Image (cartoon, grey):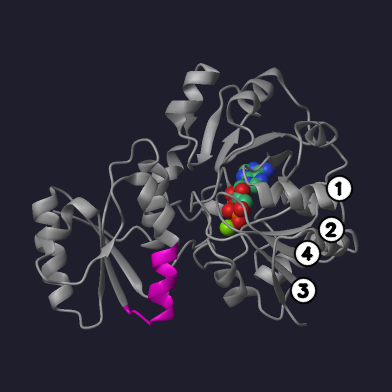
Amino acid sequence: MNTELLPITTDSLRRAGALIQEGQLVAFPTETVYGLGGNALDEQAVLNIFRAKERPVDNPLIVHIASREQAFPLCRWTDLADTLADAFWPGPLTLLLPRTALVPDVVTAGLSTVALRLPDHEGALAFLASCGRPVAAPSANRSGRPSPTTAQHVLEDMAGRIPLILDGGISQVGLESTVLDLSGEHPTVLRPGAVTPEQIAMVAGSCEVADSVMRPLQADERAPSPGMRHRHYAPQGRLTLVQGHPDAVAREIGRLYDAQPGARILAMHSHLALYGDRPVSDLGLDAADAAHRLFYLLRSFDAQGVPRIFSETLPPTGLGLAVMNRLARAAEFDIIKV
Ligand code: AMP
Ligand code: MG
């Protein structure tokens, strides 16, 4: 199959909408990462998503909608969902709500909840409007690789597997959405993202964070969010995190780096001077910069065949929690404390 990469225009949107209505797949930009979309109400189209990504079928998809009203037939909507949608939609917040029979089992991996999101991206919203139906879309990477934040990244993973990629430039947030479970007694973050537990608590009154967010799952443990179970976000080179006082971290990373030809270092901008004249990849000034750059940098290391990566950690508060959740999983929890 030939894979076209097109800018977002009236023509490419019309073509994208027609492909989705025929049961085909289209990759599209959002503010978080690029999504791989298919008609959420067409079981065959959804199965094609799993096939193109080589994704295990026990890992459910997020259903993307162009308006809040589009969610109503798919779930048991609640007042709290309204309050959160008022505050954070369109935006990087996915709500888990009890599903209706309209949603095919394959979308939710047989779970009783459906994941819903209204993205904050002009191109994504235009694409969803042209589809005229809810679109199931996980990140547009091959399973296990870092999520794509550019159309070029999608092409690397999906060339020959899907007919169309819509190019909307670089994704602003750079990490996948916050997944918030509203089906239990208290709103609970299952996957941290750019909408933080602190922000959710301000609006919802309270917000819990699943304790699996910052630790590996045990072999026999049921994952609250199935995506957390699989090896995830991983670069091809082995990644190790070093945690502690910045001076001690830079000393340890410097020592490790010097012993490993071809290794790379990830560090916050304010620490660059601590690494002397070693070349360091800059994670930026704050957690938002680090979120925006992380997957991009990991993918650039893959493209260069980098065998070994050493990274600083961030305080796990605010958006730092989401960055650390991805970094720790990309490192398969190989974390050195100094
Ligand atoms: P992706 O966009 O590729 O990160 O995939 C969507 C993620 O949303 C999955 O990895 C799941 O962890 C999460 N998700 C989607 N639906 C549900 C659900 N019904 N219950 C729990 N987690 C879900
Ligand atoms: Mg993903």
Q: Pointer 4 and pointer 1: residues touching (CB < 8 Å)?
A: no
Question: What span is in magenta?
Answer: 296-307
**Residue 163, which numbered label?**
3
Q: How far is disc 2 from disc 1 in space, using C-alphas?
A: 8 Å
Determine the residue located farthest toward the front in the rendered image: 10
Upstream in the sequence, badge 4 or badge 3?
4
Secondary structure under tag 4 reads: helix
Secondary structure under tag 1 reads: loop
Upstream in the sequence, badge 3 or badge 1?
1
Residue at x-position 20% and y-position 72%: 279
Q: How far is disc 4 from disc 1 in space, using C-alphas?
A: 15 Å
Mark 4 closeness class: few <14, some 14–19, many ≥20 residues within 10 Å: some
Q: Pointer 3 and pointer 1: residues touching (CB < 8 Å)?
A: no
- 199 relative to 280 in the view: left or right: right
Residue 305 image position (x, y, % from top left)? 38, 82
Q: Which residue is mark 4?
A: 12
Identified by mark 1, the residue type is Gly
**Residue 17, which numbered label?**
2
**Residue 132, which numbered label?**
1
